[in-house]
Amino acid sequence: MPKGTNQKLKLLYLMKIMLAKTDDAHSLTMPEILRALESYDVTAERKSIYADFDTLRDLDIDIIGEKRGKTYYYHVASRQFEIAELKLLVDAIQSSKFITEKKSNELIKKLESLTSEQEAKQLQRQVYVIGRIKTMNESIYYNIDEIHSAISRNRQITFQYFKWNVQKKMELRKEGAFYQLSPWALCWDDENYYMVAFDASAGKIKHYRVDKMTKISTINGERAGKEDFKKVNMASYNQKYFGMFGGDIETVKLEFKNDMANVVFDRFGKDIMIIPSSEDHFTVNITVAVSTLFLGWIFALGDNVRILGPSTVREKVKAEAKRMYERYQEME
């Protein structure tokens, strides 16, 4: 039998065929495997394929042969990722607002390569990202990488910060001036990435939307704010800032109806201490930034929650309620 022109790549093509064409529900017979190799201009005999299978097993590619009647069928049994795990990753990519539509499709396409062609169709049927709200900043992935690099190297960064205007164009803040900050962490809140950094000029910790940052550069200066950041518990940092909106940090005492326990646990975690205040109510003490979003959360819960203290926060709720009432009164 004359040899094909790609004989040196025989093992690689065999691996490619088995990974792409087989899974627990789809197998190949030996004649089918030989024909598939011929399509790559590789010729082979049965005995050599058996030896190649052993080599691939040594490389942790789990090839199994099963006899059905008089014929043996071969397939890859287990993979690095199960199809259920890949579906979970696809769902996470699709639901992540910070991943653009273009990058979502690119990542899902790469995930498809981790399973067989038949099972990949199950992932393709889940790709419905068009029309979903996605970030418009394609460079966010490189921003995240640059920030992680600066943190690992203990370096400061500079960047420009922007917002979108009504013309859907970038509008640089501070008239395009560069921010210089010391990044300490990245956190995730309300489907957005935030950089938590120390602002030496202001002498305090601030956070910034990563997808609103552009022209990030790492500079040689070592990071400032080490002692300040030691005081920050990143595990509870997000809980203090509703939608990552700033505000005065206060310890607020809230009283909830008992059937709101699930809402409290979802927001603040199960470790929060709840204290029964009556047969139908309980109280919690939370440390939060008293922002308009926090007040909005209180309003949204209606008569299921009540602020017991401090009085300054209760007054802010009253003032906000009055402001909203007067705003709509103007429209009548």
Image (cartoon, helix red, strand yellow):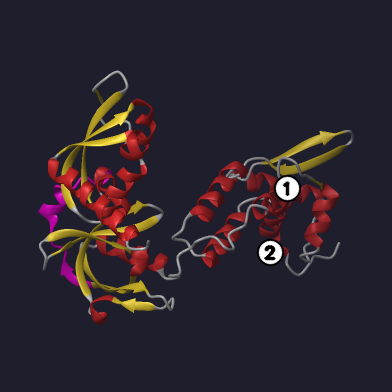
Mark 2 surroundings: few (<14), some (14-19) or many (≥20) residues within 10 A:
few
Task: Choose mark 1 or mark 2, whichever is in front.
Answer: 1
Give the image location of residue 257, x and y in percent: 33, 28
The residue shown at (44%, 76%) is: 168
Q: Which mark is residue 89?
A: none
Give the image location of residue 149, x and y in percent: 30, 63
The quarter in which the N terminus is drawn is bottom right
The residue shown at (35%, 40%) is: 301
Residue 233 magenta: yes
Comparing 210 with 219, the one in front is: 210
Q: Is residue 186 visible?
A: no
**Alpha carbons under labels 1 and 2: distance apart:** 23 Å
Mark 1 surroundings: few (<14), some (14-19) or many (≥20) residues within 10 A:
many
Please determine whether, in this image, residue 177 is positioned above or below residue 62: below
**Type of amino acid under label 2:** Lys
Name the residue beneath numbered marker 2. 8
Name the residue beneath numbered marker 1. 22
Please determine whether, in this image, residue 137 is positioned above or below residue 112: below
The image quadrant that residue 311 belongs to is top left
Please determine whether, in this image, residue 238 is positioned above or below residue 275: below
Q: Is residue 71 left or right of residue 225?
A: right
Q: Which residues are magenta?
A: 219-235
Residue 243 magenta: no
Q: Please tell me which of labels 1 and 2 falls first in the chain.
A: 2
Comparing 125 with 171, the one in front is: 171
